[in-house]
Image (tube, rainbow, N blue to C red):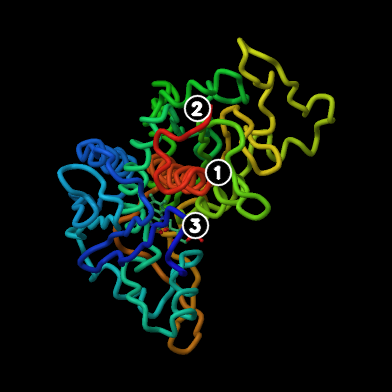
Amino acid sequence: MRNTFGNVLTVTLFGESHGPETGCVLDGLPAGFAVDEELLQADMAKRQGLPELSTARREADEVRIVSGLYNGRTTGTPLTILIANRNVRRGDYEELADKPRPSHADYTQFVRYEGYADRSGGGHFSARLTAPLTAAGSLLKQMLAAQGIRVGTHVLSLGDLSDRRFDALAPEISELSGKNPPVLDDAVMAEMKAAVAAAKAAGDSLGGTLETAVCGLPAGVGEPFFDTVEGHLAKAMFAIPGVKGIAFGAGFDFAGMKGSTANDPFVNIDGAIRTETNHSGGINGGLTNGMPVLFRTVYRPTPSIARPQKTITLSDGTETTLTIQGRHDPAVVLRAAVIQDAMTCLVIGDLLASLYGVNWLEKINR
Ligand SMILES: Cc1cc2nc3c(=O)[nH]c(=O)nc-3n(C[C@H](O)[C@H](O)[C@H](O)COP(=O)(O)O)c2cc1C
């Protein structure tokens, strides 16, 4: 089960960066849902990011659904997604066969798989594997949208620049759901482009944070004790390469707050139980409370940078220097919003399937 995620709705992932195909199998889907394949393809385009801010490796990323779909509708049997790797340059990675990149997964997977993994381009640990996950999550996003549940992620910060419109956890954060892909303020966008260009010119890379909101979930979703909404989401987020942290609601700011300001007072809005603030990020006791689920993730700066770096040889452990070739993202966070959405949708789909059963569509209690 190591490459399978989920309890009732499961996704099994396969492929390598430079192998012929990447893909995944979704099992436990509701039957009879009409899939809009154009929307899937549109999310694949979002994952590629803007050309000036992303890797020079461009792929067609054509999504082929080869099982589990009949006459445009899910059959309820395993749905297999295939995405071919076409723009492959193994030659760029030859030196890395013996010289692991600092802070990438080259060394760890060499040890874990006893030298047998196809590590070219990062192998199974490449962000290429997020292509099928994006397609799978995009399909779930359609199902959730049909139930009035919307998921949106935006870039909160890049390096030391932040999207100032979203600095505070504002009540109107539910607006986020309408901003996918993140529509950055023009001025912020210009600053971010300049920061990426400067980092690239210096042979360096940038980190950043993303913020996700899930709106329209009923209260009471989650599978405590262990598959809490936080726990299930965190596990999914840490599957995204480069994610190093996650915080829900007020997150680490709770440390400096008092109960009197941290608590979210209940209110009755036209018969609907809500809270005045949402420091809890829409989750109490591992269960949704009916407010938007809110969380932030942090992405490390891309490990593959152009500057010479210290490494060792895998063959005999000699300390040496590595200058990385190949095509890399200067700031992975700028491509990750749609991936984070997708992983979120897979988690929410699994939690709904756990609560209401495999055919959970139309069964959600409001
Ligand atoms: C969309 C996306 C694109 C990425 N592109 C690159 C890249 O071009 N070069 C690179 O070294 N790492 C890239 N990464 C990050 C690495 O895959 C990741 O840091 C590595 O697998 C190690 O995993 P970890 O950082 O989670 O420990 C990318 C990540 C994402 C989500």
Residue in view at x 21 percent, y 49 percent: 69
Q: Are marks 2 and 3 in contact (CB under 8 Å)?
A: no
Give coordinates of residue 40: x percent, y percent. 26, 41
Q: Toward the viewer: 254 or 105?
A: 254
Mark 2 is on which residue type? Gly
| Of labels 2 and 1, the one closer to you | 2
Q: Secondary structure at mark 1?
A: strand
Relative placement, left or right, of 343 versus 284 is: left
Circle 1 is placed at which residue position?
297
Circle 3 is placed at which residue position?
7
Task: Give the mark nearest the N terminus, 2 or 3.
Answer: 3
Alpha-carbon distance for marks 2 and 1? Answer: 21 Å
Where's ligand 1: which quadrant?
bottom left
Mark 1 is on which residue type? Thr
| Of labels 3 and 1, the one closer to you | 3
Rendered view: 221 above or below 327:
above
> Hey, which quadrant is residue 92 in on the image?
bottom left
Alpha-carbon distance for marks 3 and 1? Answer: 23 Å
Does the closest atom of ligand 1 sit within 8 Å of the Cβ of label 2?
A: no
Indicate which disc residue 216 carries. 2
Does the rendering let one see residue 197? no
